[in-house]
Image (tube, rainbow, N blue to C red):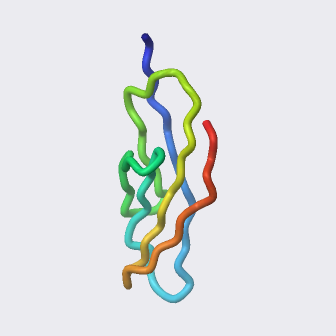
Amino acid sequence: MTTQSVPLSASAVDFDGAVAKVEFFHNHSRIGEATASPYSVTWSNVPPGHYVLTAQAMDHAGASSVSEPAEV
C-alpha cells in the first residue's frame, strides 16, 4: 500500500491578543501543531482513504475554537 504526505493549513486570528498555536486532528487524534503563521503541518504516511479533519486554534489566554470538519 502506498502512503502519501498531506499538507494541512489553517488561518487563525485573535482580535484581542495573539494565537498561541493551531493543532490539527483526524477524529480525536492529534496530527501536529503549528505555533506561527502560516499555520501548517504535513501529515505523513497517510494511507489512501477518506478522512475528516479539524483544526483547533488556541489563543494566549487559553481560549480555543475548533474549525468546521473538512473532508479529504
**Vertically, is 19 above or below 25?**
below
Q: Quadrant of the C terminus?
A: top right
Q: Nearer the viewer, residue 25 or 43?
A: 25
Residue at image point 38% right, 32% down: 44
Q: Nearer the viewer, residue 66 or 40?
A: 66
- Where residue 1 sits, quadrant-wise, is top left
Identify the residue at the far bottom of this view: 16
Residue 31 percent across, percent down from the top left: 38, 45
Residue 11 percent across, percent down from the top left: 57, 61
Residue at image point 43% right, 20% down: 3
Q: With 27 as the anchor, is 70 left or right in this view?
A: right
Number of numbered discs overlaid on the protein picture: 0
Residue at image point 47% right, 57% down: 39
Residue 60 percent across, percent down from the top left: 37, 81
Identify the residue at the far top of this view: 1
- Where residue 51 sits, quadrant-wise, is top right
Residue 63 percent across, percent down from the top left: 44, 80
Residue at image point 49% right, 57% down: 38
**Vertically, is 44 above or below 12?**
above
**Vertically, is 34 above or below 64?**
above
